[in-house]
Image (cartoon, rainbow, N blue to C red):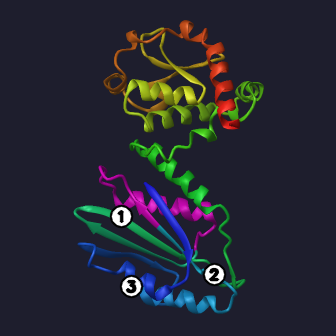
């Protein structure tokens, strides 16, 4: 799901916005934790009052959680996402408010935390919170098999040309990404909708789509490591064939192993483009 956040003040304005029914068919107060009141506006005003003992002006951390439009997401999934956000940002046990909005049968969520640590009267630091939220968001898309927005998957994070080929090979020899390869294939699947787009997404991650010895779809590293696509993304072979076509239409593993030179050339060309 898409996660958007901001550090802010304006407790009363935010509280009234969360309870606004003009733009939503249904508003549900799901959780008010760590405050003396169960009222949303009152709770956020309480967070504002506590913040007066500190120098923090942006004493709230507000996050909106928007699931894919085509998916019906259970409340438990939102709760898991909120827990992951808390853990990633060091906000576990901080006072918070969680409100659900529903419009045209589609549910989304707002979670707001007080950043003020009542024991130290200092604000919880939130360095790189946008990057951390993106990590949580990606994981949610992968775990639930949702179609990932192309803008969310940043291929440069995993593109082999961001480090030397020798370093890439070394990382593989020490089994640094036994899970990393799987994640690469999952991301490529999540941002693609055809054989061509999946193949291109794999190649951006240093992998080639091929026909395995058992006539199945496999991803091949240029060193020759073979990974079953269905096994990597947790789907049945017939689901893979529905999107990618029959494996017999692909080159074999041995034919793809001859593409190392092509891969090195592609990496070199991308490096040139980055320098322009």
Q: Residue furthest front?
A: 276
On residue 116, the disc is 2
Q: How many marks?
A: 3
Q: Position of residue 183 (x, y in %)?
A: 55, 36
Residue in view at x 39 percent, y 31 percent = 235
Q: Is residue 86 magenta?
A: yes
Foreground: disc 2 or disc 3: 3
The residue singled out by tag 3 in the image is 16
On residue 94, the disc is none
The residue singled out by tag 1 in the image is 108
Q: Is residue 19 visible?
A: yes
Q: Is residue 232 above or below residue 65?
A: above
Left or right: 210, with 160 as reference point: left
Q: Is residue 38 visible?
A: no
> Is the residue under label 3 in contact with that under label 2 (CB below 8 Å)?
no
As measured in the structure, the alpha-carbon distance from the residue carrying label 2 to the one carrying label 1 is 26 Å
Q: Is residue 112 above or below residue 168?
A: below
Secondary structure beneath label 3: helix
**Where is the N terminus found, in terms of image quarters?**
bottom left
- Start-end of magenta stretch: 64-93
As measured in the structure, the alpha-carbon distance from the residue carrying label 3 to the one carrying label 1 is 17 Å
Quarter-of-image position of residue 92 = bottom right
Q: Position of residue 114 (x, y in %)?
A: 57, 79
> Is the residue under label 1 in contact with that under label 3 (CB below 8 Å)?
no
Q: Nearer the viewer, residue 112 or 75?
A: 112
Residue in view at x 38 percent, y 78 percent = 18
Q: First in sequence: mark 3 or mark 1?
A: 3
């Amino acid at each position: 799901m898409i996660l958007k956040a901001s550090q802010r003040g304006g407790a009363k304005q935010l509280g009234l916005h969360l309870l606004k029914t003009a733009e939503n068919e249904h508003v549900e107060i799901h959780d008010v934790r760590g405050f003396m009141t169960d009222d949303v506006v009152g709770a956020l005003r309480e967070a504002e009052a506590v913040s007066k003992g500190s120098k923090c002006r942006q004493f709230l951390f507000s996050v909106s959680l928007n699931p894919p439009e085509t998916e019906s997401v259970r409340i438990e999934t939102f709760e898991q996402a909120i827990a992951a956000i808390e853990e990633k940002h060091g906000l576990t046990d901080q006072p918070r408010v969680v409100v659900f909005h529903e419009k045209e049968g589609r549910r989304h969520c707002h979670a707001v935390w007080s950043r003020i640590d009542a024991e130290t009267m200092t604000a919880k630091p939130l360095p790189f919170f946008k990057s951390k939220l993106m990590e949580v968001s990606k994981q949610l898309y992968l775990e639930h098999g949702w179609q990932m927005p192309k803008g969310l998957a940043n291929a440069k994070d995993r593109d082999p040309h961001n480090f030397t080929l020798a370093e890439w090979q070394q990382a593989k020899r020490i089994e640094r990404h036994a899970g990393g390869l799987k994640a690469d294939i999952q991301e490529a699947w999540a941002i693609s909708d055809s054989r061509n787009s999946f193949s291109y997404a794999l190649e951006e991650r240093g992998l080639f789509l091929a026909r395995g010895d058992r006539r199945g779809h496999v991803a091949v590293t240029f060193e020759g490591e073979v990974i079953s696509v269905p096994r990597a993304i947790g789907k049945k072979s017939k689901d893979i064939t529905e999107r990618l076509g029959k494996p017999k239409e692909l080159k074999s593993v041995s034919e793809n192993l001859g593409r190392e030179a092509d891969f090195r050339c592609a990496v070199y060309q991308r490096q040139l483009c980055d320098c322009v």
